[in-house]
Amino acid sequence: MRRVNASTLLQKAAKDMKASPSLDHFQRDREEIEAEEMLAASMGVDLVDPDATVPPAARRRFERMVERRSTGEPVPFITGRLDFRGLELRAKPGVFVPRDSSEFLAEQAVRRLRRRGDPVAVDLATGAGAIALAVANEVPGALVYGADISQEAVALARANARRLGLSARFVAGDLFGGLPASLHGQVDVITLHPPYVARDELADLPDEIRNFEPEHVLTDHSVDGLGLVERTADEAWGWLCRGGWVLIEVSPDRARAVGAVLRDEGFADVRSTNGGMGVTRVVVGRAAT
């Protein structure tokens, strides 16, 4: 196999991925970004020099990665890792992969927690623990819990916390079910990226989501996709302190409905916030009474 430079391989990979019907081509330059990420992983480097010559073994690894990605398999499952707000997290099939858009959810939580003394945060449906770990990393001294119904997700989140040396704690349970009772009335911020796809919309999802993500992280099987949102808004009152916040990440077309749920449950200062990517919104509400 003749040696080629990185630029040549990256251009071909991006072209192949752009031609794939299994990928959701929603973001400009997404394929170029993912190609660079996979080539860096195949070469064992942090950043790829476009003029660098790629060794044959690394080229073979990279081309296999591109083939897998073109079927829709998420890049973190292929490389076994993902970067989230400067943290390198381990990823594995069967556990929800956070998107770049979720960094805005973490940012919203961090901003509110930094204003409080001895803050407490809870991340529901935490998956690999990305939100909880970002909060623990950026708000020193915060008591941070992540909860997930999946034991596999909790095990991976705990492993990520140990490897990063972060103090976030992870528990298994249905929504708030695994949290210690001592947190009742003490939580400053609750975050949630719920499975908000309506049960009849699963078949319309792109292959890269429908064929590779566990169904329980996509839908709660409710008619409108708001089942867990409604439960969270109802049950959160028992856990939030006065003035505490609920932050919920959803698609733009769900934001208005989620805002209505929070208002109906008595939350104040409800609004939909946009992190700039246009893919999701973070709907916020405050427990004012």
Image (spheres, grey):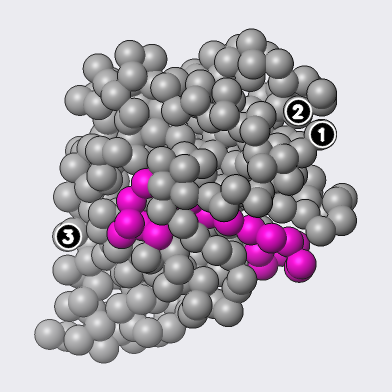
Element class at badge 3: helix
Which residue reaches farthest front? 181
The label on residue 160 is: none
| Kind of residue indicated by mark 2 | Ala
User: Residue shown at 29%/38% (left/top)?
Assistant: 216
Query: Which of pointers 1 and 2 lies earlier in the amino acid sequence?
Result: 1
Which residue occupies the foreground of this view, 231 or 258? 231
Residue at mark 3 to residue at mark 1: CA–CA distance: 50 Å
| Kind of residue indicated by mark 1 | Gly
**Label total for image:** 3
The residue to which callout 1 is attached is 243
- Check the image and report above or below for 120 versus 201: below
Say if the magenta span includes residue 143: yes
User: Residue shown at 19%/42% (left/top)?
Assistant: 211
In the picture, which quadrant includes the C terminus?
top right
For the question of whether residue 50 can be seen, the reply is no
Magenta highlight range: 136-154
Element class at badge 1: strand
